[in-house]
Image (tube, grey):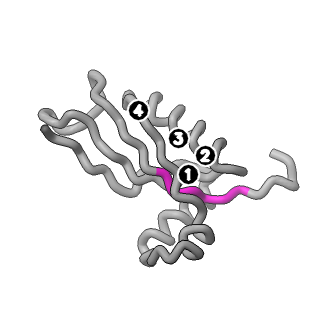
Amino acid sequence: MSEGSKQQVYTLMVEVGRKPGDGLPEKSTGAALMIYASGVDEAEAVRETVAILKQADLAPLDVSGYGTLDERLAAGDEIEAEERDLMARALAENSVVVAQMMPFFD
């Protein structure tokens, strides 16, 4: 990574479908994952997230981006300390952090 690149953390909502071995609750039809992912831009954060979820035997179907911390604050979002801590961890570790999983049921 070049010195000029600046990693930021992006908030993503990823919908996943079912796949054998995915670890989701037995009767669920899929799930939504709230994720904080680092990247030099949102496209990189999305690519990294999808790759990691596939490695974890999940089946990503759709990704929605909600921007960086600064973008979310500018939009009026209230961001709790716990959420900020997870974002800081994603940035420090240059990683993808799953903050929340909400299974879907019929």
Q: Which of the 4 image quarters holds residue 71?
A: bottom right
Measuring from the top left, give residue 65's x and y in whole percent: 52, 51
SS assignment at label 1: strand
Residue drawn where x is 55% and y is 51% of the image: 37
Residue 4 percent location from the top left of the image: 87, 55
Nearest-to-viewer mark from 1 and 4? 4
Q: Are marks 4 and 3 in contact (CB under 8 Å)?
A: no
Rendered residue at 71%/56% (across/down): 7
| Residue shown at the point (50%, 71%) measured from the top left | 84
Separation (CA) of disc 1 from disc 2: 5 Å
Tell me the residue that label 2 is attached to: 45
Q: Is 71 in front, or is 55?
A: 71
Query: Tag 1: residue type?
Result: Ala
**Would you name the residue on which mark 4 appears?**
61
Residue at the location (42% across, 77% down)?
80
Name the amino acid type tagged 2.
Answer: Ala
- Magenta stretch secondary structure, dominant: strand
Label whose residue precedes the other's in the sequence (2 or 4): 2
| Membership of 1 in magenta stretch | no
Residue designated by label 1:
37
Residue 49: which disc? 3
Answer with mark 1 or mark 2, whichever residue precedes in sequence. Answer: 1
In this view, the residue farthest toward the top is 20
Q: Residues within 10 Å of mark 4 (few under 14, many from 20)?
A: few
Rounded to the nearest whole Å, what is the CA distance between mark 1 and mark 3?
7 Å
The magenta segment: 7-12
